[in-house]
Image (cartoon, coloured by chain):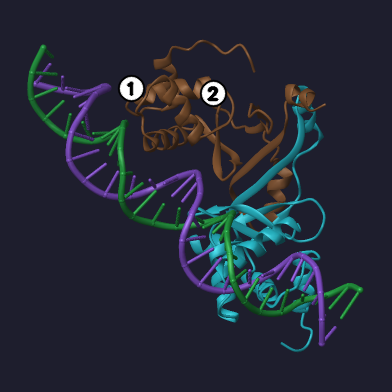
Chain colours: A cyan, B brown, C purple, D green
Amino acid sequence: MSGQTHAPAALLANELFGGSRLSVARRAIAEAVRSLGGAFTAEELHEAVASSREGIGVATVYRAVAAMTAAGSLAPVGSRKGSTLYALCAGGDHHHHLVCTGCGTVVGIACPVDGSLMRSAEDAGYTVTAHEVTLYGLCAACTRARD
Amino acid sequence: MSGQTHAPAALLANELFGGSRLSVARRAIAEAVRSLGGAFTAEELHEAVASSREGIGVATVYRAVAAMTAAGSLAPVGSRKGSTLYALCAGGDHHHHLVCTGCGTVVGIACPVDGSLMRSAEDAGYTVTAHEVTLYGLCAACTRARD
DNA sequence: TCCTTAGTGAGAATCATTCTCAGATGAACG
DNA sequence: CGTTCATCTGAGAATGATTCTCACTAAGGA
């Protein structure tokens, strides 16, 4: 691992984990997250990590996922066969995710929760504190493959 | 969301389960769903059923929840401590849910996914097939209680 | 380098959900 | 009313994802 291609692994790991201690395991996990690209389960991440460095336990992967989620760099985007799907969460601004159910690629989308929806919630007496929006569909490649 | 019509239990059960067979257990489960009012987990539903009729197994409750969800009369609205939360899904028109994180009451909200969001998804090459929207907040009573 | 403490690995523990299977029972039909 | 049979049920085992425990390691500031 020499040379700075896109984002140096150390920098990537730093960003993903948001200030927490940078161990060898977490560097490998950050690398695996990047290599996976789209949405993945904890188990898939564990397998991807194993291909680059043996001996990293499943508990470590789960802890790393929790840390990255807490740091806001990973977001849950639904589930597959009972396990939670996660996706790399780009940038700092508020957005949501559109997940391809065919291949797992993810793109960010604008937040559709607007003032009028919030106002109708307030009319019902509610104070809205959080919301979740996720779209599912097929990317261009998977749409073509389906034909 | 008060002023519920006092629908006969049999009719309620019929509606909740779509066309499937109406057993004693499912009648009791339909009754329990009505008595719970807001969002609930399968375990809470099981307990509520037990209070009206003993001996209904947890597997039966899970099967009933799956049947009602398939019939469109129940919808998953997030999770609590690792178990899925479900809520009674009113009416037939497309809507989403706003859940009070304090007491679990649920109200329906309009769908905010509009044409412009769909268009931007299409611009990214995606064919959108489904979406999930859930708001979380505090109802009037829980907001007051918090002060 | 030393020290403190967060991070780690292995596997056990937990816990929600699903499965299995023999038996019960709705509801359609004669 | 009685027969028939697919569907539903109950109990508990099985499954599987996630979390916990605990002794140990190593990151990184002093």
Residue type indicated by callout 2: Leu
Residue B139 image offset from top left, x and y in percent: 72, 26
| Res. A124 visible in picture | no
Q: Please report whichever mark, 1 or 2, sits nearer to the chain's N-terminal start.
A: 1
Label disc, if present, on residue A132 of the rendered structure: none
Residue C7 image offset from top left, x and y in percent: 69, 69
Total labels drawn: 2
What is the distance, in whole Å, between disc 1 and disc 2 at their CAs?
19 Å
**Residue B82 placement: quadrant:** top right
**Residue B15 placement: quadrant:** top left
Depth check: A35 or A66 in front? A66
Question: Is residue B120 positioned above or below A26 on the image?
Answer: above
Residue type indicated by callout 1: Val
Question: Is residue C23 positioned above or below A107 on the image?
Answer: above
State the residue position of label 2. B36
Could you classify mark 2 by the number of other residues whose Cα lies within 10 Å: few (under 14), some (14-19), or many (20 or more)?
A: some
Residue at 37% across, 38% down:
B59
State the residue position of label 1. B24
Residue at 66% across, 75% down:
A25
